[in-house]
Image (cartoon, grey):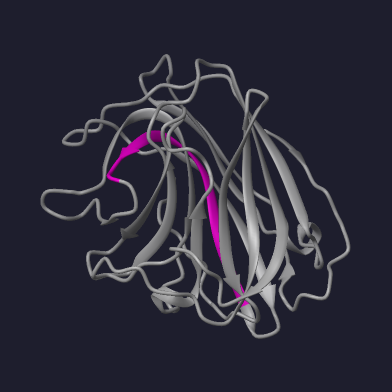
Amino acid sequence: MKESRRFAKADVSILIFVCWVGITYFTAATSALGGTAGCRLDLDGTKFNHAGLTQLTWTANIVQYDFVPSPPNPFEMRLESNSIGFSGETGTCSLSIEIEDSGHSFADDIVGSQLSDPPTITTFPALGLAFSSLQPSWPDDGHGVALLADPLLSPKFGRVFEDVDGAGTLAKNIYTREALATLPVTVKWTVTKGDTVVNPEGSLAKNAAGDFVPLLGTFVIWRFDVEINGESIQSADYYLPVGARNTSRPKIRSF
């Protein structure tokens, strides 16, 4: 794993960008003993966190991939989870950016779940990417996401409002719906602070009933871009409220 960081002075926005990256780097490859190999890296937040950032970049070089059957499931979940923290005057929130050993299948912009019967979000073995904003203490209209990538072009990013617990707690997720290119793959992420907007227009959030709900208030736009083997893809804009509060660290999946 190779990382780079860019530091810049924050502007007048109340929202301050802070980084906390918890990396679970996986190599879901069958070893000589028939198991999997992996490791975990937790960066020291007291040394790595920096207030006032307006852009962050990091890079992963993926040289090996495979999946391992895990009966009764067709394969065992493995992921790298990068947790990006945002801090304002009244608290913090986090977004997760992941490399997974799975792709996802779902219809565009649905409120769906992997827990329903039958599931409206399904997975298949593949090297995939994901962006996730899960803020269980916020209302559905407390944050939003816009998909920027063309869903018809590889790796077919798609937006879904995912019910993660079967009780209507929605995560605003972006998943790849097609496997990444043949290995090795170099993936570079860039998170950039954008404009501060009031009552942003557009279809940015849904409630559990499947209705789009407007965002009301002041939000900072954070652009999440990805570069795959040198090809740049504008992926998503996340709308985070100024002065937002969320005391829990969201976690959808674990190693």
Residue 104: in magenta span: yes
Q: Position of residue 87 (x, y in %)?
A: 68, 73
Q: Is residue 109 above or below residue 187?
A: below
Q: Nearest the camera: 153 or 163?
A: 153
In this view, which residue lies farthest toward the bottom?
90
Residue nearer the viewer, 217 or 126: 217
Viewport quadrant of the N terminus: top right
Query: Could you say which quadrant of the image residue 84 lies in?
Result: bottom right
| Count of picture labels | 0
Q: Which of the 4 quarters of the picture holds residue 9? A: bottom right
Relative depth, front residue between 168 and 195: 195
**Left or right: 61 with respect to 140?**
right
Where does residue 179 sit, x and y in percent of width and height?
42, 26
Point out the residue furthest to the left here: 117
Report the quarter where the C terminus lies: top left
SS majority, magenta: strand
Quadrant of residue 165 within the rendered picture: bottom left
* Residue name at image x 38 percent, y 27 percent: 126
Image: magenta residue range = 92-107
Residue 130: x and y in percent read 47, 44
Residue 180 among magenta residues:
no
